[in-house]
Amino acid sequence: MRRKNVNFWIYLFFIKDEEAFSYLRKHYRAMVNTIICHANVSRDGHQLNRWDMLAIADTILLKCLYWFQIRRQRNFTSFYKQVLLNEFKDTYRISYRNRMPEYYQHVYLDSKVNEETRDYYVEQTYVSQDPTHEVVIGSIMAKNYLDQVLAQLNPMQKKILSLRIKGYRRIDICRQLKISPQRHDYAVRKIKKCLQEIL
């Protein structure tokens, strides 16, 4: 795509065109992916999360659109690329500096004291770098919790709970299910009571 077309979409962005930012984000996605591939490799194996980097890239694109001055800076792509590279470098440095070590130490004050050295026993516990198991356990617990709640509700209350979870308002739920506001409020109180009993 030629440079003037990019400037045209930048202009559309400033006149509040809803599709402009989405188009610019897709247009620069290939360049961003290339930068991420190069920035995501390090000598010590420390890597940044790709999805976090894409979120950073979208944020920087938005900032660059407001910072960019068409009269002084003629090439937006070069400007955006340079700012993005600098941001990734800073993010990598911060994440590397604040990274979690491979293991941390637990000192148990109530453990047996060694008679010879009088030192407390120190256990080195290795930390898993992949938190996937915690996510899985959390999702299983949430599903079991939801199943317990649903088991105590009637079909109408289940529908109301489902719509509330999806973000529907009281008036919309009443209109969709063709129920009165009083019946909706009673169902909500019943749902809250079930939640409190399970907790």
Image: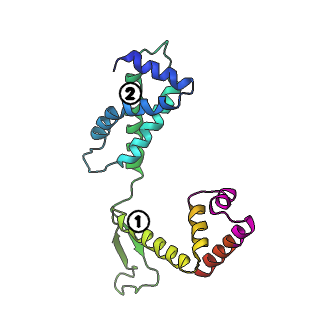
State which quadrant residue 181 falls in. Answer: bottom right
Question: What secondary structure do most residues of the magenta stretch adopt?
Answer: helix
Circle 1: residue type: Val
Q: Residues within 10 Å of mark 2 (few under 14, many from 20)?
A: few
State which quadrant residue 139 falls in. Answer: bottom left
- Relative height, residue 71 to residue 12 (above, below): above
Residue 75 visible here: no
Name the side, left or right, on which 14 lies relative to 133. Answer: right
Q: Position of residue 118 (x, y in %)?
A: 39, 82
Name the side, left or right, on which 198 lies relative to 81. Answer: right
Residue farthest to the front?
178
Residue 83 visible here: yes
- Relative height, residue 71 to residue 162 (above, below): above
Marks 1 and 2: in contact by CB < 8 Å? Answer: no
- Relative height, residue 53 to residue 177 (above, below): above
**Visual colour scheme:** rainbow
Residue farthest to the right?
182
| Cα–Cα span, label 2 and label 1 | 36 Å
Mark 2 sits on what residue?
82
Q: Position of residue 177 (x, y in %)?
A: 63, 63
Circle 2: residue type: Gln
- Relative height, residue 14 to residue 120 (above, below): above
Q: Secondary structure at mark 2?
A: helix
Relative depth, front residue between 188 and 174: 174
Mark carried by residue 135: 1
* Quadrant where the C terminus is found in the figure: bottom right
| Extent of the magenta region | 166-186
Relative depth, front residue between 82 and 118: 82
Whether the magenta-drawn stretch holds residue 69 is answered as no
